Amino acid sequence: AGGSAGGPFSCRCFSARGKRGILRAENRNLLKERDSVNIIDKLLETPCYIMDFLPKQVPMNCGGQFFEVETYLLNHYDCCGLRDRFVGVILKAMCYYPVSVHWGKWIEQPTPEQVTKIIDTILENHSGDVNILFTSKDVLLQFGWDCLNISIYNPDEEMCMLFEKIAASEGLFWRKSE
């Protein structure tokens, strides 16, 4: 359940090495598959990076209070401004790339208000995930209420550099998933 803990406690972000080239070659334009979740499943098999409130993964049995802090923050997103940080990341990224949001159905080029409402609904209900596809890059951003990070699958070098800057601007850390 912990986004930064590692091992069995890490969130849904995982990495299947070497898949980027295969995905790009087979699916130059993944939008054709958007009426199903195949696109999401394919991108979940690609390299993953995360934006996290912690600078590195918390080691197992380190003696810290990760789970207590995580539980507190998951129930008080407003405490440290995490909600605003996560919304800020997504809105800033939307300035650079066209997106489609999968929230029950695909929403093409959602408004900032729509994206903010989706994040607020997830946080208020303590339930749910949203998938945001960067349509010009075949990149997937996932946000879920049960993780204190944002997962980004299949970013190229250009996007990694941009997301690292966006993360820093929101007081978050950018790193490859472990």
Image (cartoon, grey):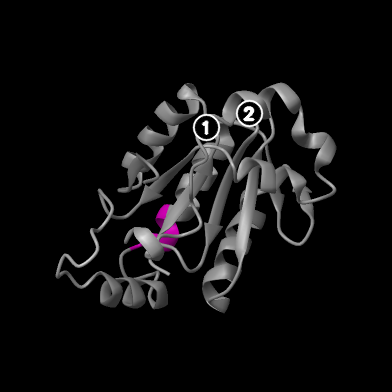
Q: State the SS at label 1.
A: loop
Figure check: 59 above or below 50 = below
How many neighbours does mark 2 have within 10 angstroms: few (below 14), some (14-19), or many (20 or more)? some
Q: Residue at x 35, y 40 (%)?
A: 175
Please name the amino acid that badge 2 sits on: Lys
Q: Left or right: where does residue 98 sit relative to residue 153? A: right
Kindly identify which residue carries mark 2.
137
Which residue: 37% across, 34% down?
Answer: 164
Per the picture, the main secondary structure of the magenta-coloured stretch is helix
SS assignment at label 2? loop
Residue 165, image x, y percentages: 36, 33
Answer whether residue 149 is magenta in the image.
no
Q: Residue 155: which numbered mark, if any? A: 1
The span picked out in magenta is 81-85
Q: Residue at x 71, y 59 (%)?
A: 103
Q: Is residue 38 left or right of residue 170?
A: right
**Res 70 quadrant in image:** bottom left
Q: Is residue 100 visible?
A: no
Quadrant for the N terminus in the image: bottom left
Between residues 133 and 58, which one lies in front from this camera angle?
58
Question: Callout 1, which amino acid?
Answer: Pro
